[in-house]
Amino acid sequence: QVQLVDSGGGLVQAGGSLRLSCAASGFIGTYRMAWYRQAPGDQRELVATITTGSTTNYADSVLGRFVISRDNRKNTVYLQMNNLKPEDTAVYYCNAVRNNVNYWGKGTLVTVSS
């Protein structure tokens, strides 16, 4: 079992950048890691994933603007978000999966003003 703590959210103007961090309580090297987001009134959606081998995938809406990375030595996953848009406003959640068991952070709020 692993516990996740998301951080790094805040208020930023459109076009700005933020870096989210997800600190895990244990070794994450055997987990697929991901970031999801949920805007008010919307369902939670997948933003980006990174496999144990560091293969990444992105939602079309963030491709070319967001970068997911992992540092297994620090048990931390990052989401670098550039050229932020108002439609990126949401609570962002870190996710870890191993053997079909999901673990979630409590979320960090990102607000992008126009």
Image (cartoon, helix red, strand yellow):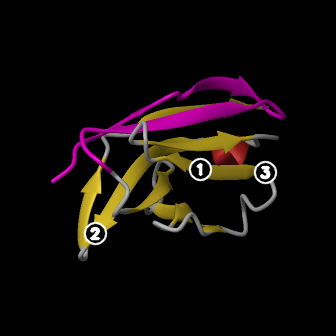
Looking at the rendering, in which quadrant would you find the C terminus? top right
Is residue 13 shown in magenta?
yes
- List the residue tagged with mark 1: 69
Please state the horizontal and vertical placement of residue 13, each as a whole percent of the image. 77, 26
- List the residue tagged with mark 3: 65
Relative to 60, say whether 112 is above or below. above
Q: Amino acid at mark 3?
A: Arg
Please state the horizontal and vertical placement of residue 90, each as a whole percent of the image. 53, 44
Q: Amino acid at mark 1?
A: Ser
Looking at the rendering, in which quadrant would you find the N terminus? bottom left
In this view of the protein, which residue sits in the foreground, 36 or 86?
Answer: 36
Q: Which residues are magenta?
A: 1-27
Secondary structure of the residue carrying numbered label 2: strand
- List the residue tagged with mark 2: 98
Q: Earlier in the sequence, mark 2 or mark 3?
A: 3
Secondary structure of the residue carrying numbered label 3: loop
62 to the left or right of 106: right
Q: Is disc 1 in contact with disc 3, using a CB cutoff of under 8 Å?
A: no
Q: Quadrant of residue 14?
A: top right
In this view of the protein, which residue sits in the foreground, 98 or 40?
Answer: 98
- Which numbered tag is attached to residue 52? none
Q: Residue at x 52, y 49 (%)?
A: 70
Please state the horizontal and vertical placement of residue 86, each as a whole percent of the image. 72, 41
Q: Residue furthest left?
A: 1
Q: Residues within 10 Å of mark 2 (few under 14, many from 20)?
A: few
